[in-house]
């Protein structure tokens, strides 16, 4: 009789939880450190750009659904941590990671592809990733990047400073300089970033996230 009473009021209790704004805790990513270097000079944080190699597996049967080392151009992948460029499980599971470190992440469906799935990934799949962090760089919105671009140290970026930075970045990655292309990019950047229209990008304007970027 007592069991029947509890079962009969359970739906009402659950309804109260939802009506009052309560919610179940979000599932966490299970993190296993496979390898960690003896010396760690820098740890990853939100806003950093990370370069990783990874293998992705289905927990249900162990099948691999993608490998950066074997699929496509086999190059490691760059992304910015913490701004939803990658799975939520990656944003949660790759913080405080050292260059050269390898982690195994077990990511629940709610932090991966959810009830819908995607491609080779069935709906409601728990995923396992073997991820090696190859490099950490300052993200595009970091104060370090701003100081690197601010050639005259006046705490604001001119069109010429942004253009010089773009040219340097293109050359660093093996692309030939193209002044016309850079001018177009600078125009687009200032349309988005120069909110007060004074012809400069301030530190405040630079560090605010924009959906277009």
Image: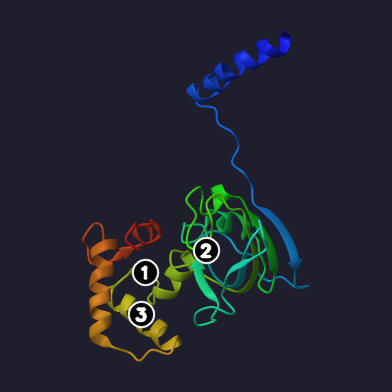
Circle 3 packing at 10 Å, graded few (<14), some (14-19), many (20+), is many
Above/below status of 42 relative to 171: above
Which residue is pictured at 49% across the width and 68% down the height?
79
Say which quadrant the N terminus sits in.
top right
Horizontally, is 191 left or right of 59 in the view?
A: left
User: Residue 67's image quarter?
Assistant: bottom right
Q: Is the Cβ of the residue at disc 2 closer than 8 Å to that at disc 3?
A: no
Which residue is pictured at 28% across the width and 68% down the height?
189
The tag earlier along the polypeptide, 2 or 3, is: 2
User: Residue 171's image quarter?
Assistant: bottom left
Q: Nearer the viewer, mark 3 or mark 1?
A: 3
> At which x and y percent is residue 169?
41, 82
Above/below status of 105 relative to 21: below
- In the image, 148 versus 76, the foreground residue is 76
Q: Secondary structure at mark 3?
A: helix
Q: Nearer the viewer, mark 2 or mark 1?
A: 2
How far apart are labels 2 and 3 at the CA level? 38 Å
Q: Residue furthest right?
A: 38
Horizontally, is 135 left or right of 181 in the view?
A: right
- In the image, 172 versus 109, the foreground residue is 109
Please name the residue that numbered disc 2 is placed on.
120
- In the image, 22 versus 212, the foreground residue is 22
How far apart are labels 2 and 1 at the CA level? 51 Å
Please name the residue that numbered disc 3 is placed on.
166
- In the image, 86 versus 208, the foreground residue is 86
> At which x and y percent is residue 63?
64, 66
Please name the residue that numbered disc 1 is placed on.
154
Q: How many marks?
A: 3
Q: Which mark is residue 37?
A: none
Q: Secondary structure at mark 2?
A: loop
Which residue is pictured at 58% across the width and 18% down the height?
13
Say which quadrant the C terminus sits in.
bottom left
């Amino acid at each position: 009789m007592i069991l029947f009473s509890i079962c009969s009021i359970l739906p009402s209790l659950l309804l109260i939880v939802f009506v009052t704004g309560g919610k179940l805790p979000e599932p966490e990513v299970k993190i296993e450190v496979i390898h960690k270097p003896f010396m760690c000079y820098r740890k990853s944080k939100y806003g950093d750009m990370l370069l990783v190699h990874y293998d992705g597996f289905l927990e249900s049967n162990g099948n691999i659904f993608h490998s950066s080392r074997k699929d496509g151009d086999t190059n490691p992948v760059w992304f910015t941590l913490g701004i939803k460029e990658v799975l939520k499980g990656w944003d949660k599971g790759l913080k405080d990671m050292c260059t050269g470190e390898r982690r195994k992440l077990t990511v629940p469906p709610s932090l991966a592809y959810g009830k819908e799935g995607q491609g080779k990934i069935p709906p409601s799949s728990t995923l396992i990733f073997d991820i090696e962090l190859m490099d950490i760089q300052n993200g595009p919105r970091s104060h370090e990047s701003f100081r690197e671009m601010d050639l005259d140290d006046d705490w604001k970026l001119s069109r010429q400073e942004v253009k010089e930075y773009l040219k340097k970045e293109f050359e660093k990655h093996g692309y030939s300089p193209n002044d016309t292309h850079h001018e177009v990019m600078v125009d687009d950047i200032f349309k988005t970033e120069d909110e007060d229209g004074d012809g400069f990008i301030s530190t405040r304007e630079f560090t605010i996230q924009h959906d277009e970027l």
